[in-house]
Amino acid sequence: MLPEHIRSELRAIVGEQYCLDRQEALVAYSYDATPMQQALPDVVVMPKSTEEVQQVMRVAAGHQIPIVTRGAGSNLCAGTIPVGGGIVLVLSRMNQILEIDEQNLTITVQPGVRTSDIHQAVEGRGLFYPPDPGSMVISTIGGNIALNSGGLRGLKYGTTKDYVLGLEAVLPNGEVIRTGGKLMKDVAGYDLTKLLVGSEGTLAIITQAILKLIPKPQTQRVMLAMFADMAQAARSVSDIIANRIIPGTLEFLDQGTIRVVEDFKQIGLPTDVAAILLIGQDGEPQAVDRDMEKIAAICKNNEAVQIKVATTPEEADDVMTARRSALAALSRMRPTTILEDATVPRAEIAPMVAAIQEITERYGLHICTFGHAGDGNLHPTCMTDARNHEEIERVEEAFAEIFAAAIDLGGTITGEHGVGIVKAPYLEWKVGAAGIEVMKGIKKAFDPNNLLNPGKMFAKETRNRVVVNRA
Amino acid sequence: MLKEALIEKLDYNELSNCMRCGFCQPACPTFRETGYEAASPRGRIALMKAVADGVMQPDQDFVDQMNLCLGCRACEPVCPAGVPYGQLIEQTREAIEEVQEHPTWVKAVRKVAFKHLFPRQDRMYRLGSMLRFYQKSGVQKAVRKLGVMRILPKQLGEMEAIMPEASGTGLKKRFGTTVIPAAGERKRRVGMFHGCIMDVLFNETNVNTVRLLTEAGCEVVIAEGQVCCGALHAHSGEREEARGLARKNIAAFRQADVDVIVSNAGGCGAMLQEYDHLLANDPQWHDDAKWFAERVKDISELLVELVAPETWDALPQSKRITYQSSCHLRNGMKVTKEPVHLLQSIPGATYVQLREGDRCCGSAGIYNLVQPEMAGNLLNEKMQHVAATQADILVTSNPGCLLQMKAGIKRAGLEGQMEAVHLIDLLARVQKKAAQ
């Protein structure tokens, strides 16, 4: 617990109601959506303005107290677990949409605005903010920016980084910086906007953001294509792109996932197929129809055993149900669900899925894979039980091999969830020792006393790289 | 010690099944009001687990947080992992109740209500007669004139003002028999669950339910020996009392040998449907509990199944109708489409969807009496959405919700423009005259 005089300084800034150190509050802000991770903070502080954030930061700097910034706590990398104790700074009260600028096509928001509220606010005006992470009904935009969140629309529309034009952020010394602006072009100095996106709360506290908007696509259509062989599905993905079509959605489910989903929902999915692709296109009605026809033909060419094109919104809903239910169905199997996000170049999806299957079998685990086929971002999902320590050890070994396999195929250890605590031991595998040194240098330049989100991104020790002879 | 009681009662497997994704939070009324993690289902489960894991002591904050939960269970349908939150909160409240030292007067009130009133239907009817005397004899008028209600807490006063006409005559006396034959060919033998408060304060709704059922081809049995469903007990931590009531109801309906057990109150129906969970550790009763739970249906499900839409007469004047669903009907019994389907099939009615009609109105059993501030906030928001529908009729499907909606209409100054009606009473109005 922090000494009384520090707590009273914090209370004076945000008010008694928003500076909590009772047991209940410490437990409630000791976790996020990451399995098996928990640590109690010393105090929970909920500021209402940039000025209050600055003052809290100055108190923390004065007494060398760590600050972990938190939005909804929906991340999957243990990015908001206060491993070093200190202050959990909850920004959910800073939840105002400050402006929608229809001339410049931007929206200016505070960090605590919910992602889906942004969607709702702009879509009512015929505008579009594409990033749609799976947790968008609860996640905050501040968290999305800090972790550079992705989603289903990554292939065609990119991810959060492609929509952040400007930021206001509080530095560890309490000063405020403003980067970028309502500008499509801005080369004045280092691109600090891009640097802060995905910095996981380790460099500064984001207190405001200007986001880019685009016109909302007029129409949207979806279809399912089922394949007896994973390679045929993967070839279809490559052929669609090679035919100069960029679908709005291009998702896939492997056989394990299909069986679990069908078992759970009974929506008539054939459980003998090896893979299902869920393909969607949006845009001008005529162009969308033309693309859907072409895509269906490509899938047929690649020996799809069944193709279902939705013709009504209800049918579209049915089609989407298969993908939307994947996580729900999988998470009901066992108490603990570990959802990873190893990512490979899209042409390497078939070998990656095969590698995951082989590793799963070798370790005697239950891992199903679904994900974003269009951008190579896979979600190998392990159903396990945190109470079974022996099994959890095998899970860790298996995932280490999966990360290694992804890197071998030119991929990465994490496509959209972030490094946080759980991927930190593997970061060096991806970026190399020199890469780590540069990143540590950047961290030092922003936060010399390591006050912001300590224990994240950089591990005390890098895990030994597993060398497996894959014949 | 509360800690030991919690460890004993809580289903640790289900606590572990919560993966902390947080998808429950947008659906949770208390989280939406407060924005406070601990006041969300994910937060409350984390607190329960922290106690079970020895990370925290269950202090007064813990108890308060558990009591702030409405028990609306809106978190259950949106939970990807299918965690039965309603059961976890009831287990927690049972543990709290077991060790809690109430002031003497609270103990007395609880004892009278939970042990001597709700479980004894004869006493409920006698209370109904007394209430009726109060309403009819002029005492109520006098009391209101004297302004006695002003000294009661606001919520109690509001409830007194909208209290429906009570009845001391139960369903059985009204029909003079326990088996009412089907009109025409018998399609089902249906056991009518009349409820405790329902049969006293909403006796007319019960009578209408029987009439709609017999017209729909059901032989209706008013199973003798049935008692209160036990929902209020279970929600207040009196699970053992609830088990006793469950056994009585199971025996009564087993004896009546019915195909279906029908309820017209979402709160009761959801409880009845969970008797198998309630008696999971009672080997002697478990099979019968399962038999019972599988047969429970809401009246709307049965009507959609058995009644052709042409059955309904047009409303005398065209009306805009909106629907506030009962939380336990929706989240407990998972009945969502049927009531709307029935409303849409009434000629002359225009159905308008109520924004956030799937969100708790704040009634939640006796929640509006024990947590007036939160309940009041929820009701005010609810009435804003209700007013926006510009509906003439606000339909709901549970007695507590109905009373809360009546109070809300009064509070929002919508009296004279809008009436709150139970779905069954509205359907009774449009039941074809020739068929009656």
Image (cartoon, coloured by chain):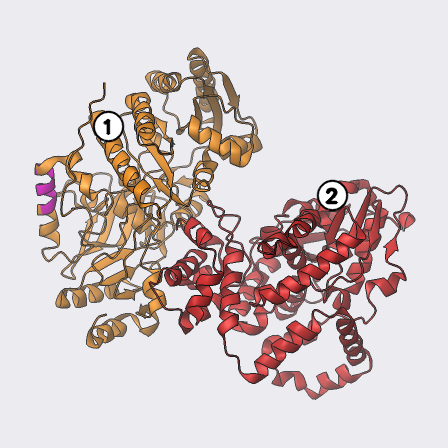
Q: Do labels 2 and 1 share a chain?
A: no
Q: Nearer the viewer, mark 2 or mark 1?
A: 1
* Chain assignment, label 2: B
- Left or right: residue A449 versus residue A107 is left
Give the prevailing secondary structure in the magenta stretch. Answer: helix
Crowd tier of the residue under label 1, counting other residues whose Cα lies within 10 Å: few below 14, some 14–19, many 20 or above = many
**Residue B226 or A143: which is nearer the viewer?**
B226
Q: Residue at 44% across / 44% down in the picture?
A: A125
Q: Chain A is drawn in which colour?
A: orange
**Label placed on residue A291:** none
Residue A398, placed above or below residue B409: above
Residue found at the far bottom of this picture: B146
Which residues, given as a range, are shown in magenta?
A434-440
Q: Position of residue B190 (x, y in %)?
A: 79, 49
- Left or right: residue B296 versus residue A195 is right
Question: Separation of disc 2 and disc 1 at Cα?
Answer: 55 Å
Q: The red chain is which one?
A: B
Residue type beneath disc 1: Ala
Q: Identify the residue position indicated by label 2 in the image.
A: B304
Q: Position of residue B193 (x, y in %)?
A: 75, 57
Total residue callouts: 2
Residue A252, placed above or below residue B241: above
Q: Identify the residue position indicated by label 1 in the image.
A: A405
Residue A400, magenta (yes or no): no
Q: Is residue A124 visible?
A: yes
Residue A439, magenta (yes or no): yes
